[in-house]
Image (cartoon, rainbow, N blue to C red):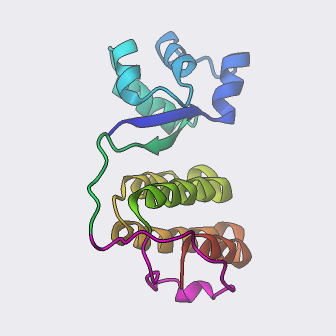
């Protein structure tokens, strides 16, 4: 599964100022990261030690994972019937978030929901959520994503407070 990376604020500052004095190999790869090239493309462009270099750049906070894309679309299953967009619903307490939605979205809606859930998580808590965001991006169906959203709710509540967690829950969890 191809992974997309983008520069963080720290990475953009490094490009402009060379403040951290990255080795030429890492700096060259950092310049190539643009949020559109997959890790596979970066490996072809930068064949020597690409994986180690990407790991180093992520670990040092110069780049972050944008998404982990499926290389082939997953087959539709009977457990996810097509539905209309999710209706607006009243706020529910964060503790009750473990309920399954009444109707599960089709794959295209699931992919959009998953992508938006990851983006919202990253916006709320930033790099603290990187490992959880990667796991969420790898989820292929609602049953895999749902417990990760519960973890995201807990993390958001811890970092940003209950109100932010409730807003996240209203957006991504149907009662």
Residue 159 figure quarter: bottom right
Q: Residue at x 47, y 44 (%)?
A: 67
Q: Residue at x 46, y 86 (%)?
A: 99
| 92 relative to 108 in the view: left or right | right
Quarter that holds the C terminus: bottom right
Which SS does the magenta portion mostly show? loop
User: Residue 102 at x, y = what percent?
Assistant: 45, 84
Q: Magenta segment, which residues?
A: 78-104
Q: Nearer the viewer, residue 19 or 35?
A: 35
Residue 140 figure quarter: bottom left
All told, the count of numbered labels is: 0
Q: Is residue 46 visible?
A: no
Q: Is residue 85 above or below residue 14?
A: below
Specify whether residue 93 is painted magenta: yes
Q: Is residue 51 above or below residue 105?
A: above
Q: Nearer the viewer, residue 78 or 151?
A: 78
Q: Is residue 124 visible?
A: yes
| 70 relative to 168 in the view: left or right | left
Q: Residue at x 45, y 53 (%)?
A: 131
Q: Nearer the viewer, residue 5 or 49?
A: 5
User: Residue 144 at x, y = what percent?
Assistant: 35, 67
Q: Is residue 171 above or below residue 46?
A: below
User: Residue 132 at x, y = what percent?
Assistant: 46, 58
Specify whether residue 138 is painted magenta: no
Residue 21 figure quarter: top right
Q: Residue at x 56, y 88 (%)?
A: 95
Q: Nearer the viewer, residue 165 or 84?
A: 84
Q: Is residue 79 above or below residue 66?
A: below
């Amino acid at each position: 599964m191809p992974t997309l990376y983008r520069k963080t604020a720290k990475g953009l500052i490094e490009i402009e100022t060379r403040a951290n004095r990255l080795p030429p190999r890492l700096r060259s790869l950092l310049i190539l990261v643009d949020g559109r090239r997959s890790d596979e493309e970066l490996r072809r462009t930068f064949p020597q030690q690409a994986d180690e270099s990407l790991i180093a750049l992520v670990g040092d906070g110069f780049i972050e994972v944008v998404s982990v894309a499926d290389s082939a679309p997953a087959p539709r299953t009977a457990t996810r019937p097509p539905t209309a967009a999710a209706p607006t619903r009243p706020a529910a307490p964060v503790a009750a978030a473990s309920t399954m939605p009444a109707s599960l979205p089709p794959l295209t809606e699931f992919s959009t929901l998953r992508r938006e859930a990851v983006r919202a998580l990253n916006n709320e808590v930033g790099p603290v959520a990187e490992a959880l965001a990667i796991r969420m991006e790898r989820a292929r169906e609602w049953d895999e994503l749902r417990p990760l959203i519960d973890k995201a709710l807990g993390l958001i509540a811890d970092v940003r407070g209950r109100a932010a967690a409730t807003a996240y829950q209203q957006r991504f969890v149907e009662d």
